[in-house]
Image: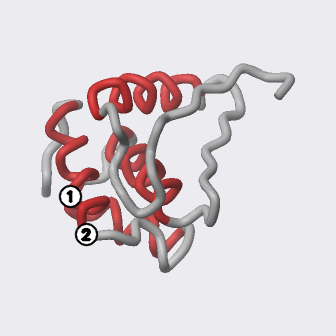
């Protein structure tokens, strides 16, 4: 690619391999999005991508208990497909100092 990229090891339908590194990358990417375009992608664009978008919603102030529903309503109704991905969004919120409700 001709632009800067970061690849996170994250198997389809699962959780990121390195959670603390993922938190750092997501925070940095979210902060960059205020000044430039960022891209988040996975194979189908729903499970892993939806999980990242729900984490971005948490960073934007959406309570983690509502973030998945928000992304399903505004992005894709199938987003954040696995139960452990929903768990990850709530866990992510605890790592960045956001509330669950």
Name which residue lies at 41% across and 27% down: 27
Eyeballing the image, is 42 above or below 75? above
Left or right: 88 as drawn, with respect to 16: left
- In the rendering, at what x and y percent does residue 25 appear? 44, 26
Which residue position holds label 2?
83
Label at residue 57:
none
Report the front residue among 70 and 49: 49
Question: Where does the C terminus fall, quadrant-wise?
Answer: bottom left
- In the rendering, at what x and y percent does residue 63 appear? 23, 53
Mark 1, other Cα within 10 Å: few <14 / some 14–19 / many ≥20: some
The answer to whether the residue labelled 1 contacts the one labelled 2, judged by CB atoms less than 8 Å apart, is yes
Name which residue lies at 52% across and 28% down: 29
Callout 2: SS = helix
Say which quarter of the image contains residue 54: bottom left
Which residue position holds label 1?
87
Callout 1: SS = helix
- In the rendering, at what x and y percent does residue 98 appear? 19, 39
Left or right: 68 as drawn, with respect to 34: left
Report the front residue among 62 and 10: 10
Eyeballing the image, is 56 above or below 35? below
Eyeballing the image, is 96 above or below 99? above
Name which residue lies at 18% across and 46% down: 91
């Amino acid at each position: 690619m001709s632009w800067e990229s970061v690849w996170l090891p994250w198997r389809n339908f699962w959780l990121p391999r390195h959670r603390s590194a993922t938190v750092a990358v997501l925070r940095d990417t979210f902060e960059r999005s205020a000044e430039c375009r960022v891209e988040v992608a996975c194979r189908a664009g729903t499970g892993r991508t939806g999980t990242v978008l729900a984490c971005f919603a948490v960073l934007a102030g959406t309570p983690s208990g509502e973030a998945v529903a928000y992304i399903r309503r505004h992005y894709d109704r199938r987003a954040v497909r696995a139960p452990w991905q929903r768990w990850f969004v709530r866990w992510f919120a605890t790592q960045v100092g956001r509330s669950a409700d």
